[in-house]
Amino acid sequence: MTTEAIEPINPSRAALLVMDYQNGIIGMVENGDELVPITRNLIRTFREHGGTVGYVRVAFADEDFVGVPETSGMLAMVPEERRAMFHADSPTTQIHESLAPQEGDIVVRKKRVGAFSTTDLHEQLQARGIDTLVLVGISTGGCVHSTVLDAFDRDYRILVVRDACADRELEVHNFLFDHVFNKRGTVVEVRELHALLH
């Protein structure tokens, strides 16, 4: 699809969501170090056009584990021996310093895979009149997939940036972009976003 076939983005009604670009997760994908400057430039472009930038990180406070049922898949992903690494105060759960939020950005901490279910992200976006989401994140099969489906059900226009997302399994990344995300939104690359924002 050419950019001419994609409806331009109105920056005043759009938010770039940077998901799980945190110290302990970036290194889990092979091209993590390459993604950071790509996403940093994308954030700068979004800011220059007056768009909203939002950050989503996954991290847990001690009380977040109280009362979680044993059936919780998230609980299984963060067993007792890994909780220090995923603690809200741990350096591993902090957003990468070169992508640091600025005053006026949206910043939420989630306790599940997707960006919406355990945060007030939707309410913050609605308060700013946001109806379009540009999604980047690690990993494609985790936070990106979950957020695409939830955002679709919440009636957002969705653009997913292929070269600013990554997964430890390339096959999963490619399958989702080729067969799933294009049915719930629009798949784009960073270079296309520059044209869509002008």
Image (cartoon, rainbow, N blue to C red):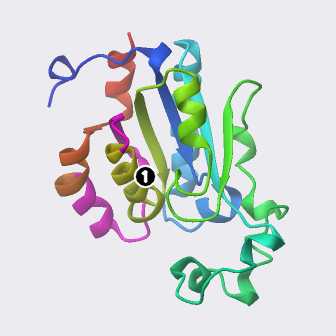
Q: Can residue 41 be seen from the camera position used here?
A: no
Relative image position of residue 140 (x, y in whole percent): 40, 59
| Lateral position of residue 163 relative to residue 73, left or right | left
**Foreground: 88 or 65?**
65
| Lateral position of residue 2 relative to residue 124, left or right | left
Image mark count: 1
Residue shown at the point (48%, 25%) measured from the top left: 130
Q: Please identify the quarter of the rendering in which residue 1 is found.
A: top left
Residue shown at the point (40%, 14%) measured from the top left: 10
Q: Can residue 113 be seen from the camera position used here?
A: yes
User: What is the three-letter code of the residue carrying label 1?
Assistant: Thr
Disc 1: CA contacts within 10 A as few (<14), some (14-19) or many (>=20):
many
Vertically, is 59 above or below 122? below
Residue shown at the point (14%, 21%) measured from the top left: 5
Residue shown at the point (50%, 29%) measured from the top left: 15
**Foreground: 38 or 159?**
159
Q: Is residue 157 magenta?
A: yes
| Lateral position of residue 21 relative to residue 136, left or right | right
Vertically, is 130 above or below 20? above
Q: Which residues are magenta?
A: 154-177
Q: Secondary structure at mark 1?
A: helix
